[in-house]
């Protein structure tokens, strides 16, 4: 996957600027100079990593492929719930049979799906619920779309969703590492003064 180009350390946080100024003042033979230089190099590297990870995550989040998977899966989920509701209205399924889907308030209404987390949770709930209902009652599947069709679309979304989770975690970890080096630099600078 191509990533958006990002500028290497286009900005320097104030704590890194302060460390840079201290480096300029230090004697290169001093032991604290090597420590300061090491901190400075690590901080610059962590800033670059953080910028790269953020750019990759943003690109993935904004990609049309992700949006397409999200919208298509959401549409199939809504249609599945509508088909389930219609089967209840026609008397093909009892409302008690729908307890396996764990709808809020016991009504067959899908709450608003606003995030990838919500979509993932509700798709799994519908697919698992339908499997439990079929196994328990040996009855007809919800159809048009069936849970099998929903699962096929959901699997595509889920693959991408897991990739998003991995990228989000990587982005968070690089931000935490950057915060840690900031504290380390600030502590170092405090000891110098």
Image: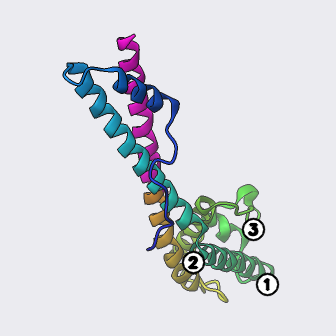
- The residue carrying mark 1 is 90
- The residue carrying mark 2 is 65
Q: Is residue 67 left or right of residue 57?
A: right
Main SS of residues in magenta: helix
- Distance from Cα at disc 2 to Cα at disc 3: 30 Å
- The residue carrying mark 3 is 108
Name the residue located 38 percent from the left edge and 32 percent from the top edge.
181
- Distance from Cα at disc 3 to Cα at disc 1: 14 Å
Q: From which residue to which does the magenta span run? A: 168-193
How busy is the neighbourhood of tag 1: few (under 14 within 10 Å), some, or many (20 plus)?
Answer: few
Residue 143: image x %, image y %? Answer: 65, 88
* Residue 98 is a magenta residue: no
Name the residue located 52 percent from the left edge and 83 percent from the top edge.
152
Q: Secondary structure at mark 1?
A: loop
Q: Secondary structure at mark 3?
A: loop
Asked whether residue 67 appears in the rendered view, the answer is: yes
Sequence-first tag of 2 and 1: 2
Q: Nearer the viewer, residue 61 or 76?
A: 61
Q: Secondary structure at mark 2?
A: helix
How busy is the neighbourhood of tag 3: few (under 14 within 10 Å), some, or many (20 plus)?
Answer: some
Q: Is residue 91 above or below residue 109?
A: below
- Distance from Cα at disc 2 to Cα at disc 1: 37 Å
| Quadrant placement of the N terminus | bottom left
């Amino acid at each position: 996957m191509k990533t958006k180009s990002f500028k290497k350390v286009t900005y320097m946080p104030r704590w890194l600027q302060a460390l840079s100024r201290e480096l300029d003042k230090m004697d290169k033979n001093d032991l604290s100079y090597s420590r300061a230089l090491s901190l400075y190099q690590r901080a610059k590297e962590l800033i670059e990593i953080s910028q790269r990870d953020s750019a990759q995550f943003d690109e993935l989040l904004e990609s049309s492929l992700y949006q397409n998977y999200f919208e298509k899966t959401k549409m199939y989920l809504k249609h599945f719930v509508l088909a389930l509701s219609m089967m209840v209205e026609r008397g093909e399924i009892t409302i008690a049979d729908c307890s396996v889907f764990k709808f809020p308030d016991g009504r067959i209404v899908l709450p608003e799906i606003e995030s990838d987390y919500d979509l993932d949770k509700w798709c799994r709930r519908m697919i698992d619920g339908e499997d439990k209902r079929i196994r328990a009652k040996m009855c007809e599947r919800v159809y048009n779309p069936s849970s099998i069709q929903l699962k096929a679309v959901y699997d595509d979304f889920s693959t991408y969703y897991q990739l998003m989770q991995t990228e989000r975690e990587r982005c968070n970890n690089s931000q935490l590492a950057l915060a840690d080096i900031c504290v380390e630099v600030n502590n170092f600078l405090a000891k110098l003064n």
